[in-house]
Image (spheres, helix red, strand yellow):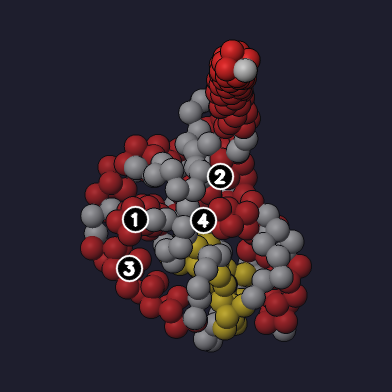
Amino acid sequence: MSTAEGDGEDLTRKQRREQARIRRKELESQQAASALRRTRLTQLGIVAVIVVAIIVGIVVATSGGSKKGIAHGKAEQTALVTEVGSLLTGIPQNGNTLGSPSAAVTMQYFGDLQCPVCREFTLGAFKPLVENYVRAGKLKVEYRAMQTATREPETFKNQQVAVLAAGKQQKAWHYIELFYHEQGEENTSYVNESYLQGLAQQVPGLNLAKWSSDRSDPQLASEVTTADAQAANSFGFTGTPSFALGKTGTPAKKFEAASFVDPSSFETAIAALAK
């Protein structure tokens, strides 16, 4: 009996060792499979990153064609200057004002040159207003500065002063229009001295030496940072573009546009004031 018990004990030990061996093999197989899964997931992650990078590259390369900033090619610059010139040529300018001094209605346009919605207005509703009302002597427009999209106050002041300096040569609106047409992507810090100089060089007939000198006039900086800022605050404006309309020679009132692309709401308000 003792022999049988010993054999039973030996058999049990063998069984335990075999079970342990089988369990170890199972664990090894599970670990190998887990490692393989991790390797595959890593490989898939790398592929996903590469695919995303390619997609981003394609989007960057193909999007925002009209918002790439300063026009570089001569042909592109010529086309833009021609387009802006055809809109403005023959219309009186005086400082920041576009239109006849005797126009029945005055519109104050508060904008930030880096504001993409201002660009939308400039290329949308504003163009027919210039063609049908400003050119006809019915409306004059005063451009006022209000910081919204431009992140750095010093940059904002510099770009707006560049406009007013061009206004000393009756070219402010050429500069404004070219800026909006060649506006870069928001929050990319594209406005630097080279950009401002590049726009000035495109303004037909602008005396660059005088423009550069006039930019240091402290009165222009004060107009941007004090007078325009106070005017915007008095109307309670919180964003750009914002507008005030009134009969010329009388206090203007805040005007809420129904659309920045469709000029209809502007036209209705102008017609009512012109009566």
Tell me which label, 2 or 1, sits earlier in the chain. 1
Residue 210 location (% of width, % of height): 28, 47
**Residue annotated with mark 4:** 115
Mark pair 3, 2: CA separation: 24 Å
Q: Are marks 2 and 1 in contact (CB under 8 Å)?
A: no
**Residue annotated with mark 3:** 225
Which tag is nearer the camera, tag 4 or tag 3? 4
Mark pair 4, 3: CA separation: 17 Å
208 in relation to 155, above or below:
above
Mark pair 2, 4: CA separation: 12 Å
Q: Helix or strand or loop: what does disc 2 sit on?
A: helix
* Quarter where residue 253 is shown: bottom right
How many numbered marks does the figure carry?
4
Q: Helix or strand or loop: what does disc 1 sit on?
A: loop
Tell me which label, 3 or 2, sits earlier in the chain. 2
The amino acid type found where label 1 is placed reads Glu
At x 49% / y 81%, what residue is drawn? 236
**Residue annotated with mark 2:** 181
At x 34% / y 37%, what residue is drawn? 194
At x 46% / y 57%, what residue is drawn? 149
| Left or right position of 269 against 186 | right
Mark pair 2, 1: CA separation: 21 Å
Q: Residues within 10 Å of mark 2 (few under 14, many from 20)?
A: many
